[in-house]
Amino acid sequence: MYQRRQSSETRVGQIGIGGSNPIRIQSMGTVDTNNTEGCVAQAKRIIDAGGELVRFTTQGIREAENMKNISAQLKADGYPTPLVADVHFTAHTADVAALYCEKVRINPGNYVDPGRTFKHLEYTDEEYAEELKKIEKKLVPFLNICKEHHTAVRIGVNHGSLSDRIMSRYGDTPEGIVESCMEFLRIFKREQFNDVVISIKASNTVVMVTTVRLLVQTMDKEGMHYPLHLGVTEAGEGEDGRIKSAVGIGALLTEGIGDTVRVSLSEEPEYEIPVARKLVDSIAECAALREQAEAGIKDDTITLEMHETDWESLQLKAAMAVGALLIDKKAHQLVIRNEGFSTEKLVELADGILQAARIKFTKTEYISCPGCGRTLYNLQETIARIKAATKDMVGLKIGIMGCIVNGPGEMADADYGYVGAGRGKISLYKAKECIEKNIPEEEAVDRLIDFIRKDRGL
Ligand code: SF4
């Protein structure tokens, strides 16, 4: 029986997240944050589609300062929707963003610690404690600014951007991801700062679901009940991106976990909103479907009886209903029945869901970011070209990431990567190793395909 987890309420401008508030839906802009007019127009499209919070990347002080203009213009135009600044690597930027935005997202993996270098560093207990003190030294003044300006904070951990410090002690494990968050949360609690929302995201749905569940248990043990923001990062686009998001986010929502949702698609941000809406509106129905499906598991097979008339609803609801069962390996096969759709299409959908839950791989997997103000090339067009050239490379994981700052870390376990390195420049990766740096954008897709073919002897 579906029951939503009881969380505390966090105030974010005019709305509340968690507590008895409805599950909030949000998205993130892709326009350069210095482009006030472009950001305002994009935010309006997101809000008009049903978005209740809009986030923009603030890579530096200049962008953080411009949030003031974006916010003023939106409010003047009758859009009081809370704005969120996304901060990585420069803690001081968060201090500035907190003056102008209703919420600031910080990433524990790079708030004080330098970006992940993938080096295995050894920390003594004293050195480790020293690092925590450094975090506290930056975090406390930031929280004081937030208190003064009634700004909420999201602690947004990404599986792909854990610090070397965390990696050295915990490795790439759910425990490490959760600890990365808890270290910050304990400081928040000590400082009696309660307007906080937590997210732990990963591109791998199994990692994402397992880790968020562990976070909830860990918070409960420490008497913390903060609201949770859910998302699958780098889910890609089109049907695959929707199915992957529905498997990961849906698995948790049907368990009652989640107070705000962002579906990350490599598409226009307003297209994310109806997908998130559908997931949120289908929770009780999919939780009931899941119970039925679990009771009917036979011969390692889940049989899902659906009655949808619309293909996208069928995709999202089916993925959401069986997401947790597959992630928990309750069965390894899936049969979907729904009148009005061909067996071939239903098998294809079942295969897509099995792949999203990492049970069976029948096609190439694309780990592509949704893009943001840091993206300096045409992400959507590039994804389409790479997909067209690699769609038969079954089982291969290809990362297509907008920027060098977060891209290499966040495409985590991709076999090959295409990463924006600067305006018109691309770097290519084999796993975590950069194999070509700063090549012109016009040549980059062909060079990536050539490299993959040669490397795999195709
Ligand atoms: S990886 Fe993509 S979404 Fe993430 S910061 Fe870079 S451009 Fe933005």
Image (cartoon, rainbow, N blue to C red):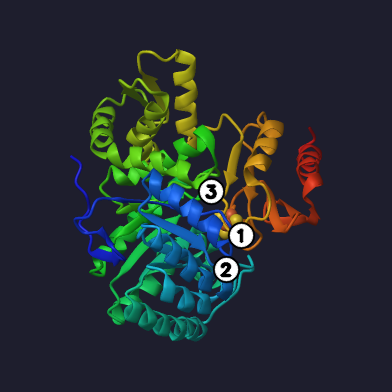
Q: Is mark 3 within 8 Å of ligand 1?
A: yes
Instruction: Name the residue carrying label 2.
Output: 59
**Closer to us: 187 or 379:** 379
Characterize the local packing of mark 2: few (<14), some (14-19) or many (20 or more) Cα atoms within 10 angstroms.
many
Q: Quadrant of residue 291?
A: top left
Circle on res. 248: none
Instruction: Name the residue carrying label 3.
Output: 234
In the rendered view, tell whether residue 200 sits above or below residue 451: below
Identified at 50% across, 60% down, the residue is 56
| Residue 191 screen position, x and y as percent | 31, 82
Badge 2 amino acid: Gln
Identified at 35% across, 17% down, the residue is 338
Looking at the image, is mark 3 or mark 1 nearer the viewer? 1
User: Circle 3 — which element?
Assistant: loop
Q: Decide: marks 3, 1 in contact (CB < 8 A)?
A: no
Say whether disc 1 or disc 2 marks the residue closer to the N-terminus: 2
Say whether disc 2 or disc 3 marks the residue closer to the N-terminus: 2
In the rendered view, tell whether residue 256 sits above or below residue 91: above
What distance separates the C-alpha of mark 3 from that of mark 1? Answer: 15 Å
Instruction: Name the residue carrying label 1.
Output: 374
Q: Is mark 1 within 8 Å of ligand 1?
A: yes
Badge 1 amino acid: Arg
